Every structure is written in C-alpha cells, then in structure tokens.
Image (cartoon, helix red, strand yellow):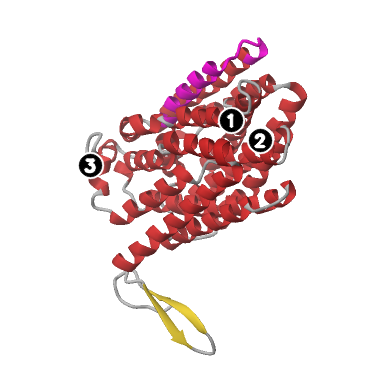
Amino acid sequence: MFQSLAEPNYRRWFGGALVSNTGTWMQRTAQDWIVLTQLTDEDATALGICMALQLGPQLLLFPVAGTLADRFRRRWMLLLTQILQGSMGLILFTLTVTNAIQLWHVYVLALALGIVATVDAPVRQAFVSELVGERLLPNAVSLNSASFNSARMVGPALAGVLTAALGASTVFLLSGLAFAATVTVLLTLDGASLHSPSRETRRGPGRGVMGGFRYLRTRPDILVVLSILFVVSTFGINFNIYTATMARMEFGRDATGFGLLNSVLAVGSLTGALLAARRERPRLRMIFWGAGAFGAACAASALMPTYATFAIVLTTVGLASITMLTAANAYVQSTTPAGVRGRVMSIYLAVLLGGAPIGAPFAGWVADTLGARAALGVGAASGAVGFLIGVVWMMTAKNLRVRYVRRSRRFVRLSYDGRGGTAHT
C-alpha cells in the first residue's frame, strides 16, 4: 500500500503536499462559509458562482497549461504556482482582518486562484512520475489521493472550529503560510534522483498545443473515461454545495457542523484512496462501478432524516467518488506516454473540473429552488448516467453480455474479456 514512500523524494513531497493541501481545504471551507453567511443571506447561487469562477479557467486555459507541463521543467513551474497560491490566501487574510472584504473580492480572488491552479494541476499530476518512475506511478497516484483526502478530513474541521472561535481571517492566514511546506520541499529535492524526461521525450508523440487531442483520437477507452467523468463531476461532485446547504438549511448547523460534514466526507474518500493503493494496476471496471455506487450513495444520503444519519451515509459518497476518480486518474496516467502526459492530464482535469461553471450554479439553483435534498438527487442521477455509459461501452467494445441462467434461483451473469472473446465471471 505504501511502497512509493520508499522513494526519499516522494516521501518528502508527500509530507509537504499534506500540509499545503490542509491549508487549501481550510481556505476553501472558510471562503465558502463567509460567502454563504457573511457576504450574502444564505445565497447558495452565489456559492455556486464562486466555485464556477475558481474552476472555470480550466475550460479556456487547459491546452496552454498542458503544453507548459510537457515543455518546461515541472519542478520550477510548481515552485512558482505554489508561491502564487499561498499569496492569495494572505490577501484574503488582509481583507478579512481589516473588515474590507466584499463579495466581489472573493469572486476576483477565486478567478485568480483558478487561473493559477489551471497551470498547477497538470504540472503537479505529471510531476508524480518524476518522483517515483513509471513502475510505482499507480501506487503514487493513489497515495496522492490519500494525502489530498487526509487534508480534506482535517482541514475543514479545523477551519470550522477556528472560524467559529477566532474568525475566518485566522484560517486564511494559516492557509497562506501552509504553502511554504511545498515550496521548501521543491527547493530541497534531490535532483539527481528525479526521473525527469529528456528534451526529446518532452517533445512527445504529438507536438504543440493540439498534441493531446491528436493522441486521444487513438484512445477510445480514455474518451469513455472522460465522458463518465464529465457527467459525474459536472452534476454530481458539488460537495461544498451539498454539505453547506444541508448543514445550514436542513439541519440548522453552524460553521463547525459544516466543517465536520466535509471531514466525514473525507473519511470515506481516504478509505477509498488507501484501498486503491493496494491494487497493482487500475481497471476500467472500477471506474464504471464507482460511478454507479456514487449515484446510489447520493440517493441514500438525500433521504437521511437527521444530521447524524446524513453524516454516516456521507462517508459512502466519499468512498464511491474517490474509487472512481483514483481509478480514472491512475488509468489515464499509467497508459499515456510521458511526452504527452501533461497535455492529456490537462484535458483530463479540464473535463473533471471545467464543468463547474455549469454544474455548480445549477446545483446551487436547485438547492435554492427545490431544496438541498433535490440537489443531491441530481448527483444521484449523474452517477446512474455515468454507470450506463460504462455498461454501453463494455457491451459494444468489450463483448459484455447479460444472460439469465437457471439454477436454484435466477441470477445475472456478466461475460466479457478485453480481447473480444468470451470469459465467464
């Protein structure tokens, strides 16, 4: 499960990323809470707009970001993006501690953070292979997810407590300073031990900004994965809206209760990431089943009558979503050549995050109009659609067949293999 941590460079990166990711989740939680309760009168649509501004740049800048990730030294690009992201947390601190913050300030900073994060994300994803090499890449991707979700488990709860006790300004200060951890790690990595691609490799099998798209035309399996991710991430993975509106509107909880729901969600996500780290290689079927399980978990959570039961079922939402996302990430990275990986991962992240300008405001509107439970119902529908896309592809491309076989009772047998033959399962 933890074999990638045997690499000294990756071990240090893992620790630094854990600190900075915790700060990121603290900042996001405090930012969402002040938008919902301080800068607006519990306006979920404004919260959705904030998310859209932060994630929207993926739609416009991802081809350029992917090209930068493949063309330049990823270590030094990460150093720049980490410094810029930390600076934005400190700007939020300054605005809140002086009581000068307004909604438009949050919108502008969310957009700026989204632009920087658009460049940072594919570089960060592709940099993992330089830390551990190709053999350990699937394991390292899963452990990265575990680090991210450990931070999501600790960060929101800590942010909720600090916001209630000391105010959001303290949270923004700590989140800005947390990026010093990754900056320090990047400056002190052992460059001789990095698996950095050569100049020829960085040119890749497809040159230029459009190289990633040309490569994906030869990979229908990745296109199916991206289709599922687009549906589920756009209309299903709007967790901050779900947790904020359920905590405030359905159960009448304060910032601490909101932060606790995010941490509970991360418990399931962390469990899913660690289970994924045990698998030797990612499989397509885990992506399909993960989407279906996510839809079922969202439906179940929408029906929970109390805060406690909702929190318990929310762990299954985190488990299912991270099972799908980790399997998809590891599958795409480990089956893509190093020279085009940055561009492919930028497309992957654009699909994963770029639907937010559509999905986040829509989820906020549904929550305002029909209630928070209805917004979770939209998430359930997205998981069902994602699962059906996977099943249809398996039936058409992988010879999946559904049969009814008479035994002591009827059951469904699914038969397929990856080469077009027939194998019973």
Position of 411 with respect to 96 (left or right) is left
Q: Which residues are magenta?
A: 96-119
Q: Dot 1: few (<14), some (14–19), or many (≥20) neighbours within 10 Å?
A: many
Q: Are circles 1 and 2 on residues that touch, CB within 8 Å?
A: yes
Disc 2: which residue: 156
> Which element carries disc 3, helix, strand or loop?
loop
Query: Residue 114 placed where, x, y %?
Result: 45, 27
Residue 355 shown in magenta: no
Most distant residue in the right direction:
165
Using the rendered view, name the quadrant where residue 414 is placed: bottom left
Which label's residue is closer to the chain start, 1 or 3?
Answer: 1
Instruction: Tell me the quarter of the image containing the N terminus.
Output: bottom right
Which label's residue is closer to the chain start, 3 or 2?
Answer: 2
Identify the residue at image location x=61%, y=56%.
300
Disc 3: which residue: 206
Identify the residue at image location x=25%, y=34%.
209
> Which element carries disc 2, helix, strand or loop?
helix
